[in-house]
Image (cartoon, rainbow, N blue to C red):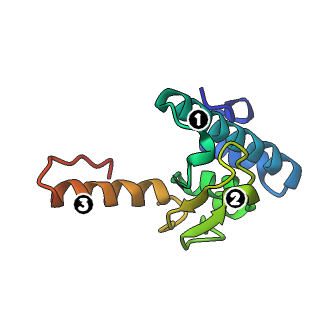
Amino acid sequence: MNPQAVYGGDLMSRIAYAQFDAKKLATLRAKALNAVNDFIEEACAKAGVSARHVYKIVVVGNTCMHHVFLGIDVSYVGLAPYAPVVRHAVVVPATELPLKAAPHAVVCLLPIVAGFVGADTVACVLGDANLRERGAAGRSSI
């Protein structure tokens, strides 16, 4: 279950919850970071690898989640013309987020195309292109 669901059942509800309210944005961000920390620990446990040996993490998501993950105000993503504050790729040390589960990692967030064309879509396009290049049957949600 999405740990942010208690703040709204859909994306627009969560944007409305956090609009123009830094404390509510911080609450959503903490839920997202905790979920990713838990996922890192779970994945490392299953793989038998120490999280201290995770050196790169790539994070993708819709535009709202991208902003929440970075602690960037989501207010304008929920208002026409639905403009993201940051569109470029972001690379940041995990400790600055903070992702405590992987203290030696660098976190890479793919670029955003537009308000409702986020890094998740960019990841799908890149993955599909990679599969097609290798001759595999690719699927895309686009």
Q: Which residue is mark 2?
A: 70
Give coordinates of residue 114: x percent, y percent.
Answer: 51, 67
Q: Quadrant of residue 95?
A: bottom right
Q: Of the residues tagged 3 and 1, which is closer to the observer?
A: 1
Q: Amino acid at mark 2?
A: Leu
Residue 84 in sight in this render: yes
Callout 3: few (<14), some (14-19), or many (20+) C-alpha neighbours within 10 Å?
Answer: some
Q: Amino acid at mark 3?
A: Ala
Residue reaching furthest left? 135
Residue 80 visible, this angle: no
Q: Residue, x 59% and y 35% (percent of image)?
A: 39
> Could you tell me residue 118's position as x and y percent?
50, 59
Say whether disc 2 or disc 3 marks the residue closer to the N-terminus: 2
**Could you tell me how far apart the alpha carbons at marks 3 and 1 are, in whole angstroms?**
27 Å
Pointer 1: what residue? Answer: 39
Q: Amino acid at mark 1?
A: Phe
Q: Any mark on residue 123, and which?
A: none
Residue 134 at what x, y percent from top left? Answer: 15, 56
Say what secondary structure mark 3 lies in: helix
* Mark 1 surroundings: few (<14), some (14-19) or many (≥20) residues within 10 A: few
Look at 61% across and 34% down and name the residue there.
Answer: 41
Residue 124 versus residue 38 in the image, above or below: below
Q: Which mark is residue 129?
A: 3
